[in-house]
Image (tube, rainbow, N blue to C red):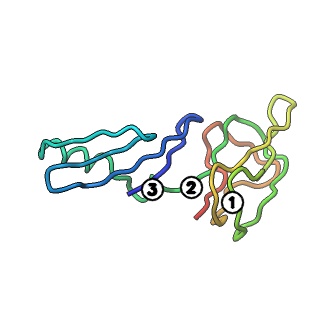
Amino acid sequence: MKLSLNIKGKKYDIEISKENENIVKIKVNNKDFTFKDKKREISIAKTSLPKRDFLKKEIKAPISGEVSEIFVKTGEFIKKDKKVLLLSAMKMENEIISDFEGKIKQILITKNQKVNNGDTLIILE
């Protein structure tokens, strides 16, 4: 299983594989970790495997502010690094850029709506 995470602006490429019944390999940014103890393998595998909600592609508000412009529509396919909206905060316009590529599944905000830091603005599939 391969996945990429973006945590506080830092990208983590993760690959999890099971070599055999007693060995699990986890690679994080090309650094290998091997777990051989069967009891530990089970707990690592259970806690490391993402749930479906964890894999959601969500664009969140990096700061509190007011949505001044939305540049995408539901159903539209966007590429990573596309400007999706403008967020006004402290008399400044902040471009919100997508960290993901995908189809816009849902836009949860409207123009002139106030949002808080961490609010989900757009969901991609």
Q: Tell which of 55 and 20 is nearer to you.
A: 20
Disc 2 designates what residue? 57
Up-down relation of residue 24 to residue 33 (above or below): below
Nearest to the eye among marks 2 and 3: give it: 2
Callout 2 secondary element: strand
Question: Could you tell me residue 11's position as x and y percent?
Answer: 54, 40
> Which mark, residue 53?
3
Up-down relation of residue 53 to residue 26 (above or below): below
Question: Could you tell me residue 54's position as x and y percent?
Answer: 45, 52
Kind of residue indicated by mark 1: Ile
Question: Distance of mark 2 from mark 1, alpha carbons?
Answer: 12 Å
Question: Could you tell me residue 23's position as x and y percent?
Answer: 19, 49
Q: Tell which of 29 and 68 is nearer to you.
A: 29
Location of residue 44 by image quarter? top left
Sequence-first tag of 2 and 1: 2
At 52% from the left and 56% from the top, the residue drawn is: 56
Q: Residues within 10 Å of mark 2 (few under 14, many from 20)?
A: some
> Which mark, residue 107?
1
Callouts 3 and 1 close, C-beta under 8 Å: no
